[in-house]
Image (cartoon, rainbow, N blue to C red):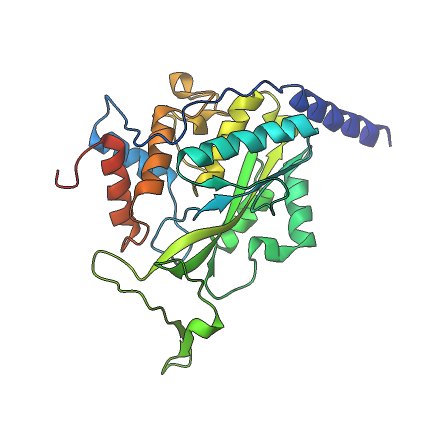
Amino acid sequence: MLGTDLKARRRSTALLMFASLFATPVFGQQNEPEIVVTAASRQQVQSFVSEIAIAPSGADQYGRWDEAICVGVAGLPARQGQFIADRVAQRAFAVGLAPGGPGCRPNVTVVVAPDGNAMAQRMFDNDPSLFAHRYESGISTLGQEALTDFINTQRPVRWWHVTRTVSADGEILSSENTASGADGFSTEVVRSSGSRLSSTTRQDFARVVIIVDAESAGRVQLAGLADYIAMVALAQLKPDAQTGSFPSIMNLFSSEAGGSRTNELSQWDLAFLSGLYAANREASSTTAQRSDIVRRMTGQSSGS
């Protein structure tokens, strides 16, 4: 009993320490038309994008939000939670998204908990459908192995994206859009024109779940954590990406990143998000999409 009480007090202290890191938000420029990475070769930028970006299982396209996001934060006092929600909304607005207004239904859920693993397991047990655990037509995730890693692998911040396949013009693919094939399996029917360079479909985020472990994340400033959350909310990134060679907010919790560790979205991060949201959403493959993102990050013309 004494050991349990001590453990509970430690977790409570971790949450209080985490909450005490609140600071006044500093807003940067919004709706920047183009952000490029300077003093870096195309090969370096290509390596960065290849290292961090990942596509949902079974889809050869990177996902992104369509028009609007709504951020809900639980587990923090109202001011701290609002700070994180506002920072994510700010970063979303900068890439052309519309932040949800008061009372919107969250599609980005951020939960701060004293034990991230326990919270991930509890959320999954309570509602497996939140993580699209079972097969749903038109819905993609990174798969069962990645979900097991999400639940069981200790990280300061963990994230889970659920992606929806829609037509190139945004039409949701439902049972009305399917037809039975000769092999007995249903296939999606969409009324969009595809080609060798573009697809008839695209990948839109349906929802993102982000869990913050207060005890291990409490050593960083809230502003830096909020930018980290914004980065993983706006793009589907590899949880085990090795970014130590690049200046990135993804090094926030790394003790080995050295000068590459930043406390806010770096120019590389901003350029990546800008490139992702400006790139062709209906690209025929992640290879084509990645090339488009890199071209935009380096400020090169399409003909170069």
In the picture, residue 186 is in which quadrant? bottom left
Number of residue marks: 0
Residue at image x 43%, y 26%?
Answer: 265
Q: Quadrant of the C terminus?
A: top left
In the image, farthest residue toward the left: 303
Could you say where residue 222 lies in the image, as x and y percent from the top left? 57, 23
Looking at the picture, tell me which residue is in the foreground, 79 or 131: 79
Residue at image x 68%, y 41%?
Answer: 118
Q: Quadrant of the N terminus?
A: top right
In the picture, residue 51 is in which quadrant? top left
Could you say where residue 198 lies in the image, as x and y percent from the top left? 25, 57
Q: Is residue 32 above or below residue 172?
A: above
Could you say where residue 91 lies in the image, as x and y percent from the top left? 46, 32
Q: Is residue 160 above or below residue 28?
A: below
Left or right relative to 135: residue 14: right
Could you say where residue 170 lies in the image, as x and y percent from the top left? 40, 58
In the picture, residue 74 is in which quadrant? top right
Left or right relative to 275: residue 210: right
Looking at the picture, tell me which residue is in the foreground, 160 or 304: 304
Looking at the picture, tell me which residue is in the foreground, 123 or 93: 93
Residue at image x 62%, y 56%?
Answer: 128
Looking at the picture, tell me which residue is in the foreground, 303 or 55: 303
Q: Is residue 156 visible?
A: no
Left or right relative to 19: residue 68: left
Left or right relative to 41: residue 160: right
